[in-house]
Image (cartoon, coloured by chain):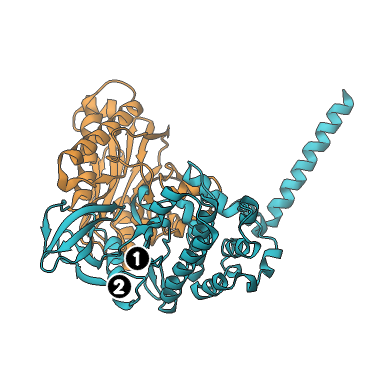
């Protein structure tokens, strides 16, 4: 893996920006014209993993298919280099994570502006059949003008692409705070997946914490599937009920009950009072546990368990009466 | 022999018939699995430590996965047979722990092998008893009569999710994170090694596989192959079938039948 101070191609590597399971990212500079860039190197440990290469190729394809100020432009792809790397346009600004860490819960108007800018970029991606699937504050850069750039399309999905499974150590799975119920259950995800993650981010900007969190990643996953987030307008009295309703609808467990895509979310954020919140009147039951699903598929097992329980109760009652 | 079965071997030693097959599959550029069968010539060693069958599935770039799986398997064999006294199960577990330390220190000492880790499933058969030491998501089965009993539990994030009820078996089997391991040989300086044990009966067949086999075959397919064919032919047939169905991952299968 190259180090800061080294030169790769005609780019000088400056500060490291981050390291994930599959890639290490540096800020760099074009030695020819001084332009700032982002250099993303595939982790050497992932070399030889066909799925990791497939994800990198997909990121290249997505980078070439998108042209929006909210998506860093792909400048170069060096898939044959060792290690392979991508050169992306640098997105100036601060990550939303830095902003939240420094400022805590944001004023409602600012949170709504960032959320709307995020939804605008997401809507553009969805219109081009690209689903990011890994939206989180670390992957969102807020410029000085308040506009959002989404970075790291490493696990994004282009409609029609083959499914690739993850292989390696479980650290690759990342943080579950922004995972959707369908991702936790192993499904592929689509536009509603980004809507859910945007809902988590909106919630976090207003509440100062994501709706579900726990020191144990598995417990956080359980919460996504089974618990209801505390309504935002109950946590903060200055959050208007329609804004809380937008977050609540985006966070519905079942994808078809959320806003269908980024464009619908954007429309809601622009006019919160006109949002259809009918779905919030409906119950949002926990996603059935495997045991319940199994029992539904095999009702005789349920009947048998009920019968067994009744028999035990009768025997216990009889024993007590004899005493 | 079909061209894609890169290595296949068989041995009939005393009352054990063994067959192994390993192959890169049809997608991955190289085979990072490793299979090892040991049954020492030395009569004392043979009576005290018996036979050893190991499969390992390496991960990590620059060929590190292949180094990790081979190093782990040979370290287990060396450590297991080095100490002739004591209970075989304890010796097998200690050997797996030594293999973990060896792979861990090797990857720390060689930047080119920085990411290497491996699964490890090792079966020891000594007299009328067996022991299975296990880390990762390779699998060991005991085929006894018509029943196929799983001897290992996967150390994967999805298996943990399944155990606490987040996903059911069907979802776990096709989950996109099903190969993400929570425990590996070489991942950390120390590792908890699962140990299964039991009595051996005449006719028992033990089957060890890496996870790639189950991308295409069901446990029942494997059971049928080892029920109807001698271990060498069954192992080769399973690899051949998995390759015919896509060969998405490296494929390794090893079976040993007792009292064959």
SS category of the residue bearing label 2: helix
Q: Is residue B165 above or below residue A261?
A: above
User: Mark 1 near mark 2, Cβ–Cβ under 8 Å?
Assistant: yes
Q: Residue at x 44, y 67 (%)?
A: A118
Where is residue B120 drawn, in percent x and y?
31, 42
- The residue where tag 2 is placed is A63
Q: Is residue B127 above or below residue B113?
A: above
The answer to whether residue B3 is seen in the rendering is: no
Residue nearer the viewer, A247 or A76: A247
Circle number at residue A228: none
Relative placement, left or right, of B174 versus A13 is right
Neighbor class of circle 2 (other Cα within 10 Å; few <14, some 14-19, many 20+) is some
Where is residue A81 drawn, in percent x and y?
14, 63
Q: Give the chain letter at badge 1.
A: A
Where is residue A26 drawn, in percent x and y?
23, 56
The answer to whether residue B91 is seen in the rendering is: yes
Residue that protrudes farthest toward the top in the picture: B85
Chain (orange):
B
| Image quarter hosting the N terminus of chain B | bottom left
Q: Residue at x 31, y 54 (%)?
A: B235
- The residue where tag 1 is placed is A153
Q: Give the chain letter at badge 2.
A: A
Q: Is residue B104 above or below residue B26?
A: above
Mark 1 or mark 2: which comes first in sequence?
2
SS category of the residue bearing label 1: loop
Chain (cyan):
A
Relative placement, left or right, of A166 versus A85 is right
Neighbor class of circle 1 (other Cα within 10 Å; few <14, some 14-19, many 20+) is many
């Amino acid at each position: 893996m190259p180090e800061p101070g080294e030169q790769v191609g005609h780019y000088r590597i400056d500060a490291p920006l981050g390291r994930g399971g599959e890639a290490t990212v540096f800020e760099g500079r074009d030695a020819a014209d001084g332009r700032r860039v982002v250099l993303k190197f595939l982790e050497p440990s992932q070399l030889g993993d066909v799925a990791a290469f497939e994800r990198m190729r997909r990121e290249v394809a997505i980078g070439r298919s998108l042209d929006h100020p909210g998506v860093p432009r792909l400048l170069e792809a060096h898939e044959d280099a060792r290690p392979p790397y991508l050169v992306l346009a640098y997105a100036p600004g601060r990550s939303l994570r830095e902003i939240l860490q420094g400022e805590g819960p944001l004023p409602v108007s600012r949170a709504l502006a960032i959320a709307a800018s995020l939804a605008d970029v997401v809507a553009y991606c969805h219109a081009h059949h690209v689903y990011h699937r890994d939206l989180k504050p670390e992957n969102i850069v807020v410029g000085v003008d308040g506009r959002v750039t989404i970075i790291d399309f490493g696990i994004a999905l282009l409609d029609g692409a083959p499914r690739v499974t993850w292989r390696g150590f479980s650290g690759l799975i990342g943080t579950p705070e922004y995972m959707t119920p369908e991702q936790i259950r192993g499904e592929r995800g689509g536009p509603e997946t980004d809507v859910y993650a945007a809902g988590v981010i909106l919630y976090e900007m207003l509440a100062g914490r994501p709706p579900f969190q726990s020191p144990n990643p598995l417990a956080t996953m359980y919460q996504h599937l089974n618990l209801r987030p505390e309504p935002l307008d109950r946590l903060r009295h200055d959050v208007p009920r329609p804004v809380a309703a937008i977050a609540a609808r985006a966070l519905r467990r079942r994808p078809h009950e959320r806003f269908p895509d980024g464009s619908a979310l954007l429309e809601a954020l622009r006019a919160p009072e006109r949002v259809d919140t009918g779905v919030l009147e409906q119950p949002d039951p926990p996603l059935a546990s495997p045991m319940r699903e199994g029992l539904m598929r095999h009702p005789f097992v349920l009947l048998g368990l009920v019968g067994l329980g009744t028999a035990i109760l009768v025997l216990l009652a009889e024993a007590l009466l004899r005493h | 022999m079909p061209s894609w079965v890169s290595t296949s071997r068989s041995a009939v030693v005393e009352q054990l018939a063994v067959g192994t097959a390993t192959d890169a599959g049809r997608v991955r550029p190289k085979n990072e699995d490793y299979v090892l069968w040991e049954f020492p010539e030395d009569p004392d060693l043979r009576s005290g430590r018996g036979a050893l069958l190991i499969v390992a599935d390496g991960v990590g770039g620059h060929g590190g996965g292949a180094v990790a799986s081979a190093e782990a398997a040979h370290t287990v064999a060396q450590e297991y047979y080095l100490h002739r006294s004591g209970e075989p199960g304890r010796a097998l577990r200690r050997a797996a722990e030594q293999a973990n330390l060896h792979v861990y220190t090797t990857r720390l000492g060689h930047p080119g092998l920085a990411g290497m880790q491996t699964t490890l499933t090792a079966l020891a058969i000594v007299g009328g008893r067996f022991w299975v030491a296990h880390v990762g998501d390779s699998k060991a089965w005991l085929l006894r009569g018509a029943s196929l009993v799983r001897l290992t539990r996967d150390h994967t994030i999805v298996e943990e999710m399944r155990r606490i009820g987040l996903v059911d078996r069907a979802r776990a089997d096709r989950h996109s994170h099903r190969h993400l391991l929570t425990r590996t040989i070489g991942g950390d300086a120390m590792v908890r090694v699962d140990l299964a044990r039991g009595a051996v009966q005449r006719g028992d067949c033990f089957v060890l596989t890496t996870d790639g086999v189950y991308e295409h075959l069901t446990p029942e397919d494997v059971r049928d192959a080892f029920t109807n064919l001698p271990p060498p032919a069954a192992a080769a047939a399973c690899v051949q079938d998995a390759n015919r169905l896509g060969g998405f991952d490296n494929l390794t299968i090893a079976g040993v039948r007792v009292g064959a």
